[in-house]
Image (cartoon, rainbow, N blue to C red):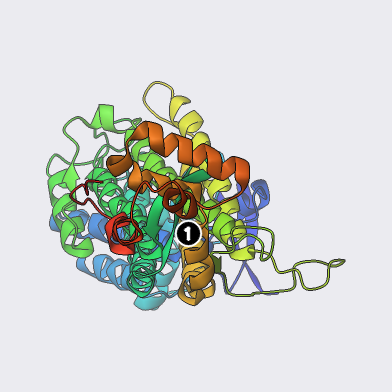
Amino acid sequence: MKTRIEHDLLGYKEVPSEAYYGIQTLRAVENFDICGVKLSAYPKYIKALAMVKWAASKANNELGLLNDELNDAITKACEEIIDGKLIEEFPVDMIQGGAGTSTNMNANEVIANRALEIMGFEKGDYDHCHPNNHVNLSQSTNDAYPTGIKIGLILKNEALVANLIELIASFRAKGEEFKDVLKMGRTQLQDAVPMTLGQEFEAWAVNLEEEILRLNENAKLFLEVNMGATAIGTGINSEPDYPEKCIKHLRDITKMDIVLAGNLIEATPDTGSYVMYSSAIKRLAIKLSKICNDLRLLSSGPRCGFNEINLPKMQPGSSIMPGKVNPVIPEVVNQIAYKVIGNDLTVTFAAEAGQLQLNVMEPVMVRAMLESMEMLENGMSTLRERCIDGITANVEHCKEMVLNSIGIVTAVNPTLGYEASSRIAKRALAENRSVYELILEEGLLTKEKLDEILAPERMIKPQKFIKA
């Protein structure tokens, strides 16, 4: 392998000649073989870092700190990364010491070396475009890195919400498909009152729909950034007009309503927005897991369970029990939820660990949130495509359970009164007979009136009382 020699504070190292990253990236790769997940696993995050570097370059150019040739080359390099090129040149582990310096330098080196090529120079010829002196000009890791994180999370949130909207549409379609399927509702796993299967699926759709607003509202917190803070928020090594100009260009590049934090010393160590957004991801995961618990219950059986719905058969369910098929898709979504809940706790502890003017634990926070979002995206797609869209209903079985349920006595309670209804329910349980049969036997209602009260359309929404 051909190499080039680069140097830094600690000395000299050989870097692969074809690599766009440089010596500091290489040191990070050697130092941080931690979770095995590289920056390149999250292209939107890398694109966000390039947007930050592009905005900084344009601001420095306007201030006369960076000449047109350098600005044009850096701009071109950043545009290429935003277009999806050079993503594989980000090999640093997501979890790293140094408060994100390795990530920032990975971006600085890749952009600098690509800019050098654009200007006609060799990679590593940093006299003409330097990762620190030019690409990182007027910045530090402590403002460029968190700004990139926040933009990356906003981009990732857009994809997450789009995926959620598709899942909601699938639940809503099933709600319409099953709108006439009468079934028994349950509380505390006991028979309650009748409803339709369509109402159940529509309720899940509405339950998830609430999360669109929660996710988007919490993602808006990321619009406040600390660009221009440099090391701790005092703005050292940047010119007075730099923050305003950088934010203006960042807004133009990202098409986002990004604003500069009111107090950069406060904003630099603050990770409150991560805590809030992570909690919104967790809330979505909890809701998805609860719905999957319900799907597993409603499809249980087929002979000895609820057996109200059939989930698509994905794979044989046992190495020893022939014919067994398991609800593997809801099960995997449950497990995703557990991981998301754990990741939220990681964010909580990491946010609390901030000290004085910086929180050095941001790498594990961004790793936790991006992992949660990626898993939820994949999980929701899998749930929609391999489960929800293929669910069928056991219509007659659902109806039979309603007619044989003690719970339908609730429907006649307003007419017969609580005492008579309780007596009928008790007899039905003791004698293993139907409520319907016993009401007629005791002559409490005529068959016509009982049929009117127990008509499916009357039991699934508020109705005027019928007198005995």
Furthest toward the right, the residue is: 320
Residue situated in front as seen by the camera: 430 or 179: 430
Residue 391 in the figure: left or right of residue 63: right
**Residue 86 position within the rendered picture, expressed as x and y whole percent measured from the top left:** 47, 72
| 118 over 432 or under it: above or below | below
**Residue 273 position within the rendered picture, expressed as x and y whole percent measured from the top left:** 32, 38
Image mark count: 1
Of the 4 image quadrants, the one containing the N terminus is bottom right
Residue situated in front as seen by the camera: 16 or 52: 52
**Residue 338 position within the rendered picture, expressed as x and y whole percent measured from the top left:** 57, 45
The residue under the point 32% across, 36% down is 417
Whether residue 136 is visible to the viewer of this picture, yes or no, is no
The residue under the point 28% across, 41% down is 414
Furthest toward the top, the residue is: 356
| 142 over 263 or under it: above or below | below
Whether residue 434 is visible to the viewer of this picture, yes or no, is yes
| 234 over 327 or under it: above or below | above
The residue identified by callout 1 is: 403
**Residue 221 position within the rendered picture, expressed as x and y whole percent measured from the top left:** 25, 43
Q: Residues within 10 Å of mark 1 (few under 14, many from 20)?
A: some
Residue situated in front as seen by the camera: 451 or 199: 451
The residue under the point 21% across, 64% down is 253
Which kind of residue does numbered mark 1 sit on? Leu
**Residue 68, picture quadrant:** bottom left
Residue 91 in the figure: left or right of residue 178: right
Q: Name the secondary structure under disc 1.
A: helix
The residue under the point 54% across, 45% down is 428
Residue 383 in the figure: left or right of residue 461: right
| 82 over 50 or under it: above or below | below
